[in-house]
Image (tube, rainbow, N blue to C red):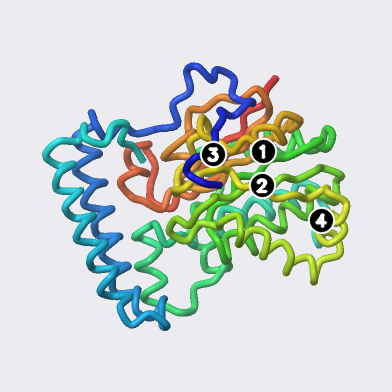
Amino acid sequence: MTSNDKHYICPLLKNPELYNPDTIDLCNNVKARNYWLPCLEQMVKKFVNKAGYLNPDDPNATEKAEICFQKFHSLIEQLMDDPTILKPLSMRDSFNSFEGKWLELTNGVLAGNVFDWGAKAVTDILERTHHFGLAEAMMTIQKRPWFHDDLDSWIKRLKKQPYRMCIIFVDNCGVDFILGILPMVREFLRQGTKVVLTANSTPSLNDVTYRELNLYCYKAALYCPVLKESLAQGQLITVENGQRGPCLDLSHLSPKLCDVMKCADLVIIEGMGRAVHTNLYAKFAVDCLKLAVLKNEWLANSLGAEQFSVICDFESAT
């Protein structure tokens, strides 16, 4: 997509005219603004030190990153003085039992979602140790009962009958998508559900881009017959969502995604940026599952939770 492409509002929202993607209003919430703006500045500063080895073919990578940071720092200072300049400013088959299988699949998505370079607590862990994998992430997140725990209701609905079509807004690349999302996708496909995976149109942090999404699915299909057959038959498709950042604005989606998702009866939104910073209060005309790990202590506390608490929010359309 280009900057001139049209965008449309998600056709599955219950009250699109009332939709506001933002959970936190940084313009009017001084306490939140005083926390988030310095937090974002520190996060960008960290990438300056990584620019060199992330771009080994560019001898000027660190210098370019430093220039970028200085511009960002200047913007942060302006926002601290006058937060209105950027309105709106704001902050996404080995088990015998059906329940056990979906519990592990959901746990896998949540544990995978820990691997987020946009979360300071996670980057601190990953920089301290090179031995932090999915198993360690599962031990890090909150044990059940979760802070918001609709898993039993979600599994109860799954047992009734398979969904026709599931739209999944994916989050981070790497462990999050490959070990978290793909196993759940595979199980949906085995049940006969058509799956639409949708990712950002352009890069943002370590979020999956549409180009990377296609590459991941192609390579995974080389090892998984279920994925290979589903891609060939059109039961598994990928669509870019028109987004450019780590959050999710459902009033600004790509026209193709809006057209495809009209037939969906399930929406899954994964990740803190897409499901908590934005869309925590969004209502849909179809079933919706929001999955996220609260990796930011401030955000968790503001919701009455603790760091690494889990949100498993299932809302039925009926």
Q: Which residue is mark 1?
A: 256
Secondary element under disc 1, as helix, strand or loop, is helix
| Residue at the image point whose x is 63% and y is 40% from the top | 268
- Are the residues at dot 1 and dot 2 in contact (C-beta closer than 8 Å)? yes
Q: Nearer the viewer, residue 291 or 222?
A: 222
Q: Amino acid at mark 1?
A: Lys
Whether residue 312 sits left or right of residue 41 in the image: it is: right
Q: Which comes before the other along the chain, label 2 or label 3?
A: 3
- Are the residues at dot 1 and dot 3 in contact (C-beta closer than 8 Å)? no
Q: Position of residue 299 (x, y in %)?
A: 35, 43
Q: Which residue is mark 2?
A: 239
Q: Which residue is mark 3?
A: 5
| Neighbours of disc 1 within 10 Å: few (<14), some (14-19), many (20+) | some
Q: Nearer the viewer, mark 1 or mark 3?
A: 3
Q: Which comes before the other along the chain, label 4 or label 1?
A: 4
| Residue at the image point whose x is 56% and y is 47% from the top | 1
The Cα atoms of the two marked residues, 1 and 2, are separated by 7 Å
Q: Amino acid at mark 4?
A: Leu
| Residue at the image point whose x is 16% and y is 52% from the top | 74
Q: Is residue 289 above or below residue 14?
A: below
The Cα atoms of the two marked residues, 2 and 3, are separated by 15 Å
Q: Nearer the viewer, mark 4 or mark 1?
A: 1
Secondary element under disc 2, as helix, strand or loop, is strand
Q: Position of residue 125 (x, y in %)?
A: 39, 69
Q: Quadrant of residue 11?
A: top right
Using the rendered image of the protein, determine whether residue 147 is visible from the camera's viewpoint.
no
Q: Which comes before the other along the chain, label 1 or label 3?
A: 3
Q: Which residue is mark 4?
A: 231
